[in-house]
Image: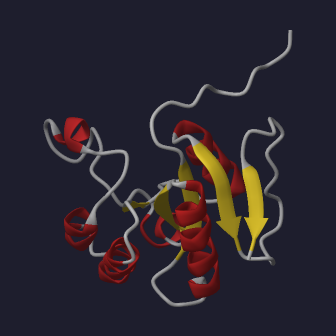
Amino acid sequence: MDQQPPQRSGTPSVISLTADDDRYAATRRAATALAKQEGAELILYDWDSAELFGDPLPSVWSADGTDKDVPDRLDEAALEAAGRHAIARQVEEAKASGLATTAWLPSEKGTDALLKFGHEHGAIAIVVPADLEGLADDQGAIRIVEA
């Protein structure tokens, strides 16, 4: 049986790797330009959050009802509340350029988790640094862009 790529609905997205430091600044710039060109929203994917925090967001074990309050993307206020000031500033910067922008703090690290997130969020492209290895979309639905 052939596996069909997931159906996209709503606004397409471009995902960019990011981190607290500026080592992915060129990646964010390329993703910002691509998102503008494609009329897509930008999602900044914090590559370090899973490594630094494990699960950086509330879960069913955190407190009664908090699992229902966890969004699938975060704005500046939620990033600040999660202690991710630098990522919140990056979201603000992208929004100031006129792009709808949010971020995500993954609890799993690695390229498989990144690709899964991309499929779940209608990504048309994932922008990564050229030295990131092991990211390929076997379904062919997401373009991988090195910057």
Q: Residue at x 18, y 42 (%)?
A: 66
Where is residue 142? Give x, y as percent.
72, 46
Q: Residue at x 36, y 72 (%)?
A: 91
Along the horizontal axis of the image, is 106 left or right of 133?
A: left
Q: Residue at x 62, y 53 (%)?
A: 114
Place residue 146 in its image quadrant: bottom right
Q: Quadrant of the N terminus?
A: top right
Where is residue 100? Give x, y as percent.
37, 60
Where is residue 106? Give x, y as percent.
48, 56
Name of the residue lying farthest toward the top: 1
How is the model colour-coded? Answer: secondary structure
Name of the residue lying farthest toward the left: 64
Along the horizontal axis of the image, is 4 left or right of 14?
A: right
| In the rendered image, the vertical position of residue 93 relative to residue 49, given as above or below | below
| In the rendered image, the vertical position of residue 116 relative to residue 109, given as above or below | above
Residue 47 in sight from this viewpoint: no
Count of numbered marks: 0
| In the rendered image, the vertical position of residue 93 relative to residue 134, given as above or below | below
Where is residue 65? Give x, y as percent.
15, 36
Along the horizontal axis of the image, is 57 left or right of 137?
A: left
